[in-house]
Amino acid sequence: MFDDVAPKYDVVNDVLSMGQTRRWRRIVVEAMDVKAGQRVLDLAAGTGTSSEPYADAGVDVVACDFSLGMLKVGKRRRPDIDFIAGDATRLPFADNTFDASTISFGLRNVNEPKKALAEMLRVTKPGGRLVIAEFSQPVVPLWRTMYTEYLMRALPAIAVKVSSNPDAYVYLAESIRAWPDQDHLAAWLQEAGWESVSYRNLSGGIVAVHRAQKPAGPADGPAAGAQALANHAGPVAKLRRNITRPGR
Ligand SMILES: C[S@@+](CC[C@H](N)C(=O)[O-])C[C@H]1O[C@@H](n2cnc3c(N)ncnc32)[C@H](O)[C@@H]1O
């Protein structure tokens, strides 16, 4: 499916988000807070739009995705970026490779998102950061109702006019509705072994940006995710106590 939408992917996104994607992406880059020369993994990078700001700032960014169609469009546009084919649930990188990892509007598309969170933990250096941008749940009920109407009615109708594969946008609407809310995703991060988990809402919660850090201690290596899961064994509600939420 991503191979099909690749050629017009960025234009369609701008139209459907009414220009908001640029602002959301700027906030993600600020949250990553990486410096020139550092090594960053941009997972599910698609055409590399989410990777470009890092490359422009002199950061050594690796754009990884499993859609060859998306990678091809990206490489044509930005030959200077390192595009690598790889599956988020079995990353082709050694343990502790990256200073920071990020995934924008991609985790929801991964078949086994919890595995991807464990894999990103494995390949990130101890003390390294993770930033996730993903569609989420608007917090104010009226805004949530209006947004759901947009998703389920207006978005598929607009997609018919601007996209070569409107069905992909029906899938988009359905996958957003089925995706866990802000607190739930934060709990998944803790389960996977990430620490200092926090999030902020953008556009009233249409998008959430989650931040977390890999423990600096001995919980490195391939077993880090499993070990952390064992350490945190217990109800999700218990994990949720340590999440930093907006306005706290
Ligand atoms: C909506 S695009 C996001 C692209 C880019 N990060 C952005 O912000 O524009 C989602 C991407 O996730 C990729 N994807 C889905 N499942 C994946 C997996 N298991 N491993 C790697 N990439 C995956 C798709 O190929 C697609 O390019």
Image (cartoon, rainbow, N blue to C red):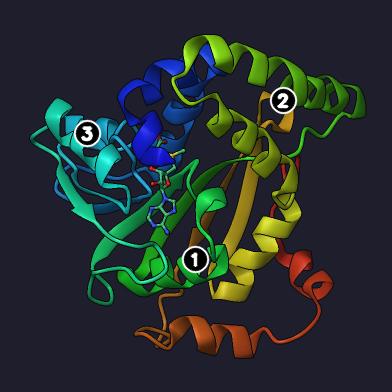
Mark toward the viewer: 2 or 1: 2
Estimate the spatial distance between the alpha carbons at disc 2 and disc 1, rounded to whole Å: 27 Å
- Residue farthest toward the left in the current orientation of the protein: 80
Q: Which mark is residue 247?
A: none
Amino acid bearing label 3: Gly
Whether residues under marks 3 and 2 lie with C-beta atoms below 8 angstroms apart, the answer is no
Q: Secondary structure at mark 2?
A: helix
Name the residue nearer the viewer: 190 or 43: 43
Which residue is the site of mark 1? 117
Q: Secondary structure at mark 1?
A: helix
Give the image location of residue 79, x and y in percent: 9, 34
Residue in the picture at 75% in, 38% down: 137
Estimate the spatial distance between the alpha carbons at disc 3 and disc 2, rounded to whole Å: 27 Å
Whether residues under marks 2 and 1 lie with C-beta atoms below 8 angstroms apart, the answer is no
Q: Assess disc 1: are there few (<14), some (14-19) or many (≥20) residues with their C-alpha within 10 Å of its C-alpha.
A: many
Q: Secondary structure at mark 3?
A: helix
Judge left or right: residue 107 versus residue 9. right
Which residue is the site of mark 3? 74
